[in-house]
Amino acid sequence: MSSNMASSSAGSGDSSAARKNSKRPKCIDYSSALLSLTLLDSKFTQQELPACKPILTPGWVISTFLIVSVIFIPLGVISLFASQDVVEIVDRYDNDCIPAPARTNKVAFIQGAAPKSCNRTLTVTKRMKQPIYVYYQLENFYQNHRRYVKSRSDSQLRSPKFENQISACKPEDDAGGKPIVPCGLIAWSLFNDTYTLSRNNTPLAVNKKGIAWKSDKEHKFGNKVFPKNFQKGNLTGGATLNPDIPLSEQEDLIVWMRTAALPTFRKLYGKIETDLENGDTIQVTLQNNYNTYSFSGKKKLVLSTTSWLGGKNDFLGIAYLTVGGICFFLALAFTIMYLVKPRRLGDPSYLSWNRNPGGGR
Amino acid sequence: MAGGGRRKRRRLHLSRIYSYTCGKSSFQQDHSNIGGPGFSRVVYCNEPDSPAAERRNYAGNYVRSTKYTVASFFPKSLFEQFRRVANFYFLVTGFLSLTDLSPYGAVSALLPLALVITVTMVKDGIEDWHRKQQDIEVNKRKVKVHDGDGIFRQDEWRNLRVGDVVRVEKDEFFPADLLLLSSSYEDSICYVETMNLDGETNLKVKQGLDATSSLLNEDSDFREFRGVVRCEDPNVNLYMFVGSLELGEERFPLSIQQILLRDSKLRNTEYVYGAVVFTGHDTKVIQNSTDPPSKRSRIERKMDKIIYLMFGLIVLMSFVGSIIFGVETRQDKLKNGRTERWYLKPDDATVFFDPERAPKAAIYHFVTAVMLYGYFIPISLYVSIEMVKVLQSVFINRDIHMYYEETDKPAQARTSNLNEELGMVDTILSDKTGTLTCNSMEFIKCSIAGTAYGRGITEVERAMAVRSGGSPLVDEDLDVDVDKSGPKVKGFNFEDERVMNGNWVRQPQAAVLQKFFRLLAVCHTAIPETDEETGNVSYEAESPDEAAFVVAARELGFEFFNRTQNEISFRELDLVTRENVERVYKLLNVLEFNSSRKRMSVIVRDDDGRLLLLSKGADNVMFERLAKNGRQFEAKTQEHVNQYADAGLRTLILAYREVDENEYIEFNKSFNEAKSSVSEDREALIDDITDKMERDLILLGATAVEDKLQNGVPECIDKLAQAGIKIWVLTGDKMETAINIGLFSSRFASSLLRQEMKQIIINLETPHIKSLEKSGIKDEIELAYRESVVKQIEEGRALLDASGASSEAFALIIDGKSLTYALEEEIKKTFLDLATGCASVICCRSSPKQKALVTRLVKSGTGKTTLAIGDGANDVGMLQEADIGVGISGVEGMQAVMSSDIAIAQFRYLERLLLVHGHWCYSRISSMICYFFYKNITFGVTIFLYEAYTSFSAQPAYNDWFLSLFNVFFSSLPVIALGVFDQDVSARFCYKFPLLYQEGVQNILFSWKRIIGWMFNGLISALAIFFLCKESLKHQLFDPNGKTAGWEVLGGTMYTCIVWVVNLQMALSISYFTWVQHIVIWGSIALWYIFLMIYGAMSPSFSTDAYMVFLEALAPAPSYWLTTLFVMIFALIPYFIYKSVQMRFFPVYHQMIQWIRYEGHSNDPEFVEMVRQRSIRPTTVGYTARRAASVRREDRFYDQIHKDLVAF
């Protein structure tokens, strides 16, 4: 031990030299690789950075709830108004468009050769300003099934160079050894009901241009890719495509190929670019080709205007209003709670560790 | 060393001082093995290049302590990585993602894994690189190597070969295990400091063979030197060496006495010559180095359980999903030539979707689902935690408040694994000497001829004074106050004008005083060293006590200044001439100190020619050796000794006698015979002879040496006790000293022992046992011991039970002998019960092994976290056994530090280490893990819920890259910031309210309740996010242009909501906002949008369905923004309500403190003091609180807070 004493007393003589090599934690120490990465000042290493230390004081809690309700209620009102502005006509036709005698075996009918034409009449109950969007709605159709979603070849759709990239498309990959363009189950099951609309016996033009996303048309579906061998397999799925029109122009296909998120979905069919007046009746002649009967899926035709918020969906408005209201009440409730159980400042018993044992947890 | 001109030390025969260690070695049984198996090494000294030596091809002296080499780094560290369950799981899913089973792309699955693994590997690599640097430093040290023709040149350590002859200078380390050939002393002894090996700082003596030392004195003598060493193979035994040296025709036996071990240091010897026997990894020290036991923190072990729970959940969910999937797939069966979901073409499906083989499909689907739901387990968890812990360690290392200026030592977290464990310590097991105390002995009092001298006030006395008058309120500011003014001589704190400055001559018993001081100056083995410039003498001694004595003698005017092989010279004041005269005593024999003898004597011939035996030793051995006529001062001295012990001082009794010439001659003869005997019982023989000599002594007096408490120890112990940490002291000291130190530390009347505390003392010093011991029947004694211990333990328990829940605190004091029995299998349970019932426990006279055993007992017996703190080699077992080992990087070598998890320079830093860093790390890590699982459950459950809407076909709700980057980019940095920076309570308040620490001890912040609560919160968030998004995007008519939203829009919206919700949740739950937090939280959210834009702008072949989603579809749609806003607020409301109510009405302790801070009472000292005292728990502390008048109210408060803490 005294050896240490001796050496340390000897060391104190040249303490200046020792200081140089001091291991005293410094502001920046380049010996540590991790630390030299960040510029550190001593506040940082000593964990004394200026900090805001918010805690949930009554003021914060109440004002937070109030602010939320103040923001939410108007938003809810606006959203609800927007949704109310939207006029929507929904017509379910899957059942009605099967002739009554065939309804015992709808699948046989839809797969049979009998004419599938069907007339529907829609009444406009409120003035609809153009553009009016025409949708078809399918229910219980699992476009989001993994097998279905994966069954496509994006590269093939994009460029004729990749025509043979069909490995993902099985079993709709080729027809007699030749690649199907567009391949895969999604394209194969393309929706093929058609609607012809007329108002008071004058045809209503349904514009089928501009219904797909621009990026899809321009970048995902090539304008040099033409349908090939489509629906030539042993089993026809859905619609056929005109082999002379490039995929980028086949907007129905493009819309269909953007798979829906949920088993109930709408897809844009076209746009009506004239206003519809209150009381107008619209005759729809539709070709009921698409088989949703085997999986008991509903088919609906939807005519809808849009607002800035989209289609008719009261949910968001109601939700905003509800939560805004709840927050308002919470603000009230907390105010009352804080008042009922006030705490005098400066009284240590306010720390509640002396509070009545009965009133606690 | 000292420059070029080597000062030639007079060649001395010092070996005769050392009767025990120095002696001839002989061929023993072991030597017959030489040449056989296990003893095959042959070293050709001084001819490492000879063909014979080269044929042997022994390893070089290069030492590698790195875990990896360049070649083994990849395979080995990868293997380490994948030993972790979660990583292995991700590896398996990564491989599976290459198959058709995968619900997502292989690259997006493997890349995050690769990233995470890479980060960990880089971290490992950096750590290893640092070790490499150290290796290089060590391997490049220089040593003088014989280069032939008697010329020595400098060479690097790594180039040493077996057989090289090296010359090691004073204060240099030995580069390898060397055979000592000769030294600067004529009898070729040398002093070695083995601090790095065993932590002992006293110098050890090694002695070379006469055969070599007579040959080799100069560099040039090595020109022709040849020798062959045949010896044992490399092994771990530090205290054994078997070999022989062949010089020409002759063979000499070699023992450990001739071996200089690597990493020990040459002291007090100008130079030695040695031949390299073992190099590099063959050396004993490296053979001995084992990796410290890897310790994992409790939190991490619990985290593993959470991971297993998550696995369970995943399997359960996958199972449910697979069943439904199987059922739905089976329904797609071909019926009447038709299939239900014809668009899926189930009649032409792969096995994964084949309705005909639905069970099989379900099983495959199960695997897929397990992969998909893997997001429940945060892939970045381990790596984040590791990074966080490293950064936390950096903070610990850099903490200026734990930096000890005097020794230039910052705290050093050697393993970062245990940071949060520091916040959960229940019991501290502390060594005493060097840990609580400075281990620098100070001569403070003495009793000579029955008169007590020394006016110095010991700290204990000061503490007692404070206790009687001082108020703790004032003392807190007083803090570290013990600095004394004026230059002080180290080791000397003696003040008494009666004896100082030569005044002793005027004392009535001046002759005795003179003898006393002479004895101090003569009876030791210290070696003086004279500074040639100033003439000051300093000493190197084997123990600090001894140094204190020599220094004391010097300061009192008996300056020991020179030692030759048989003379001791000192200056003293001549009583007659009143001038300093030099006296030379002939040193005849040294009867060394050892722990069984407990005394040390020298036989000298003074300058009057009288033969004197001077002796000093422990009181119990010395008093019984006094002559009848030497007991003049016995009673008085005994009284003083007891007083000194009470004051926490270490005492020694000094006595002498004159020896008859004939007696001496006879003694010397038999003593020398015994010394040179080579029989097994040599030591017993010496013992016997010396025992006969050291008798009939005349008492001179007693010395008292103070082992000062380190600065701030009592305050620190007080704080720790207030924090509810139990402190056990395991010491080698005797019971009285230990009790007094315990008392002493309780300066603020709280900690180890209080005066009003009831002491339960267990020892084996009852008269009955003593009488039995005299009778000497071994078995009977054993039996009596055991019975006595059991009886005492049971009595203690009874006492404890009787006191019941009353506030009386007990202290248990047990000595080492009793401990042996208390630790026996059948008794130890009762003992532990007793010990845990006591507020403090002191184990005296415990051996290192017992220390480790006690630690294990506490650890496994209570199941709580234990922290062991110690500084010496004898604490190593304890440090390794405890959950956390803290080494004091003080004076006693590096052994404790090397085997510790965290090293600090002073005991008092433990307070900051535990209360501040420990608490922070604990609360950070536990919050961090909770949050990790929260966010991943939020994420994972939305995936699961979406599955339910895809007929469980394992279609992920999000793009592949969204999936895989969630853990890596959009949610990881805030968690890391939380883990590194969050402070629930600032350091100042951690100190002010030590009970806060109980949050960790009782594991409130990482209880299952809290974990499950967070998971539940995650579930709520997920439900809110999924259903709200789904509803608000119903029919997917979300765009003013009539476009419908597809899968990618729903996914994008949900994902946006998740990123917002988890990050806002973070902002809501942390209580400490610096710019770092702002950057990472808002940055993570911004990063998501940026990523979405950049990724969406990439070519569609890469971005697939995320192409332009944000810019084209999401951003222009007001409903997207409205939905996001609504969902993120809504998902947070439940937590916000919970937190508001809980914070206000049911605050846990740290929240109470936050309130105090918020409401500004922290600046009101009285208020804080009140709250602080009220937070003190009754079991550990009573006095402060009990002193208050309103006892009843207090007690209710204790119960309440205790209940609160437990209940939460």
Image (spheres, coloured by chain):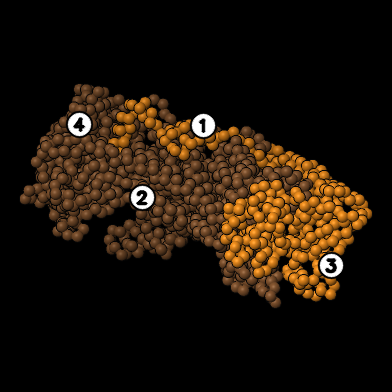
Chain colours: A orange, B brown
Q: Is residue A235 visible?
A: yes
* Tag nearer the camera, 2 or 1: 2
Of all chains, the one bearing label 4 is: B
Give me the C-alpha separation between circle 2 and circle 1.
39 Å
Asked if disc 4 and disc 3 are in contact, CB closer than 8 Å, the reply is no
Q: Secondary structure at mark 2?
A: helix
* Tag nearer the camera, 1 or 3: 3
Q: Amino acid at mark 3?
A: Asp
Asked if disc 1 and disc 3 are in contact, CB closer than 8 Å, the reply is no
- Where residue A154 sits, quadrant-wise, is bottom right
Residues indicated by labels 2 and 1 sit on the same polypeptide chain: no
Q: Which residue is mark 2?
A: B71
The answer to whether B972 appears left or right of B682 in the picture is: right
Residues indicated by labels 4 and 3 sit on the same polypeptide chain: no
Give me the C-alpha separation between circle 2 and circle 3.
75 Å
Residue B839: x %, y % from top left? 50, 50
Q: Which residue is mark 1?
A: A41
Give me the C-alpha separation between circle 4 and circle 3.
122 Å
User: Tag count in the figure?
Assistant: 4
User: Is B714 above or below relative to B777?
Assistant: above
